[in-house]
Amino acid sequence: MVLGNTIYGYNYEVLLNKGVVLTNTYITLLKNRGFVRIYIDDGETADIVLNDPISDKIRIMSTKNIFKTYKITQSAITNIEAKTAESIIKCINAPKIKKSFQESQAFKQLCNDINYFIDEIMNQDILSGLNSIRSIDNYTYEHSIDTAVISLIIGKKLHLVREKLVQIAIGEFLHDIGKIFIDEKIINKAGKLTAEEFSAVKQHPTYGYELLKDIHNIGIVSAHIPYQHHERQDGKGYPRGLKGTNKLDDKGVTFTEQEKMIMIAEIAALADVYDACSSDRPYRPGLPPDVVYEMIKNGAGSQFNKELVDCFLSVVPKYPVGCEIRIKNGKYMNFTGVVSSLNTHQLLKPKIRLLTDNMKNKISPIEIDCSSKGIDTEIEGIR
């Protein structure tokens, strides 16, 4: 097999270049580094274009900046022995930690480079797919990038002004930074968390907010993305049990009601769940995109802002390009293949390419346009 995408390591150095033949040694290396899945160059799908919303250059630049910002901040807290949430918050607000964060070159670079990131997203109308390849170690940083991508595409659809898009981007880049104040063994635990462990994890939005709230490069509105990204419309989220209005804020982004979610945080909450559920984690494999799509749709009104979900569903396809699918009905029932392209006017009806029959035998590729008149092919995503 030939590698389809370049693979980057923990410090975003090149591990293996696109086009390398995958030997057993390379496969073992990737597994040991925590990679669960990769892209392969396949002659039968070589013409299918996986359009990442951002270029490799911008993705790597932004991810490196996030990575370095986390690591520099972590180095400032290595000797902290605070155990309770209150004592941790007190330490976070100590001048040493605030200064190490705000004055780090990585954080300054992250703020300086954010406009390059936004410029690339502004060329996208729909999210055809997210092509990041994650190891267990770099999940947090890639997740931050991809949630920013999703949120900015939604922001563009809502015609938010540039200032608001910048607020969204910086808030998303750092929305999980509060996790650095929680024991890594809990964050990376493969099994189910205990009640005590989950209680500790639920503090990370507060920790993130406390770290960011006084940083002038970020601003109080952006700091509320880390603070509110686990809140829900029905008030059953955490850490404060805020409620939403289930309406789009026609003023774009406001910060007026202390007991209500603000819209950029509602966007972040939606993007966070979509990307997290789609991703492989130590405790479970990622869910197929159509399953996550339905989760978002079914969560409208209770978990997510109802009107915002409608916007999300108009820019995020149920079956992204490259998604593996299975036929559920008709003469091709149980044949499998991939989504080869999207119909931007009917996102629920993509073009598909069947590659194996119902006995998992390879076949000559069969092209089906699900949006064509008279075609009633039903499909489902598979992992």
Image (spheres, grey):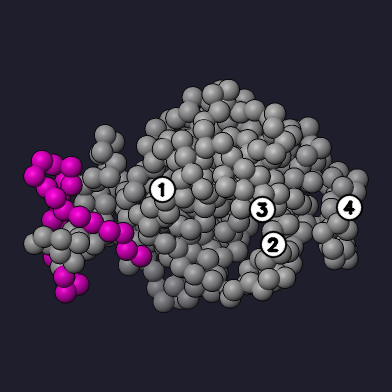
Q: Quadrant of the N terminus?
A: bottom left
Instruction: Tell me how far mark 4 sits from mark 2, CA to CA.
Output: 18 Å
Closer to the chain start, of discs 3 and 1, is 3
Q: Amino acid at mark 1?
A: Lys
Instruction: Tell me how far mark 1 sits from mark 2, CA to CA.
Output: 26 Å
Residue occupied by mark 3: 238
Q: Nearer the viewer, residue 373 or 53?
A: 373
Depth check, mark 2 against mark 3: the one in front is 3
Residue occupied by mark 1: 297
User: Which element type, helix, strand or loop, lies under badge 2?
Assistant: helix
Please state if 158 lies on the left or on the right of 82 as rendered: left
Q: Amino acid at mark 4?
A: Lys
Q: Amino acid at mark 2?
A: Val
Q: Badges 3 and 1: C-beta atoms under 8 Å apart?
A: no
Q: Nearer the viewer, residue 257 or 153?
A: 257
Closer to the chain start, of discs 3 and 4, is 4
Residue shown at 18%/66% (left/top)? 334
Residue occupied by mark 2: 201
Q: Amino acid at mark 3?
A: Tyr
Q: Quadrant of the C terminus?
A: bottom left
User: Which element type, helix, strand or loop, lies under badge 1?
Assistant: helix
Instruction: Tell me how far mark 3 sits from mark 4, CA to CA.
Output: 20 Å
